[in-house]
Image (tube, rainbow, N blue to C red):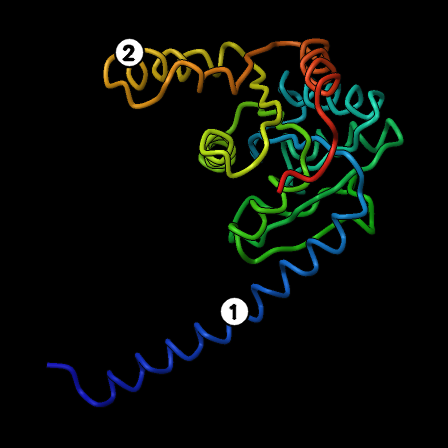
Amino acid sequence: MRTEKHHKGWNEIKTNDSWAIFKIMGEFVNGYEKLSKIGPCVSIFGSARTKPDNKYFSLAENIAKRIVESGYGVITGGGPGIMEAGNKGAHLAGGTSVGLNIELPFEQHDNPYIDRDKSLDFDYFFVRKVMFVKYSQGFVVMPGGFGTLDELFEAMTLIQTHKIAKFPIVLVGTDFWEGLLDWVKKTLLDTFENISAKDLDLIHLVDTEDEVIDILDAFYKKSNLSPNF
């Protein structure tokens, strides 16, 4: 049986929830103000656990360099692993290097290759994801875990439902992504018909930095560079 004390505690929780709105608004305002000035950028996603001696670390670094050489900046989640590789490549190529950091109990810490004035800190994943989607002209998705998959499928859903304009989504690493794509085609599309065939046009599977740049260049020969919503 609930007591008056329990009800009081519940009311305090609800009051704190209301005040959290202002903190959320502050993260949105700060993000919009800073990221509206960065120019065209491509986001690179992937595992925070990827070590520098892993082939995908080197590949992410090289992709980031090529992205900068093609006239874009690079956005990452600001942490170690693939994120560090992306920021490192952008930094070494002399381009814009943005880090959207998230406070986590493990794994996440700022990497040293983010431009000082382009390092943002977030408490809320959903605010951070809005920034990625709004200010990215493409997603380059390296091998990763749940967070990487979350970003990938959110972008695909928003494009599929026309909530944002279409932009290139490039999966890098056939050995990592092929099994997932086979499942999507066989199970989601063929067996259960939960998606349409044209939804698969949203994504590209590649293995080299040249292929990544070719996809970005081909897309933006036909489309304007602008925020996505």
The percent coordinates of residue 85 (x first, y second) are 71, 29
| Residue nearer the viewer, 194 or 129 | 194
Residue type pointed to by label 1? Ile
Q: Residue 135, relative to residue 214: is it above or below?
A: below
Quarter of the image where the C terminus is located: top right
Q: In this view, does 164 lie to the left or right of 196?
A: right
**Residue pointed to by mark 2:** 190
* Location of residue 53 with respect to 137 vertically, above or below: above
Q: Between marks 2 and 1, how big is the CA–CA gap?
A: 43 Å
On the image, which quarter does residue 194 sit in? top left
Label placed on residue 21: 1
Near mark 1 (Cα within 10 A), the count class, few <14, some 14-19 or many ≥20, is few
Image quarter for residue 69?
top right
Q: Residue at coordinates 59% horizontally, 51% vertically from top-left?
A: 102
Residue located 37% across and 82% down the image: 12
Label 2 SS: helix
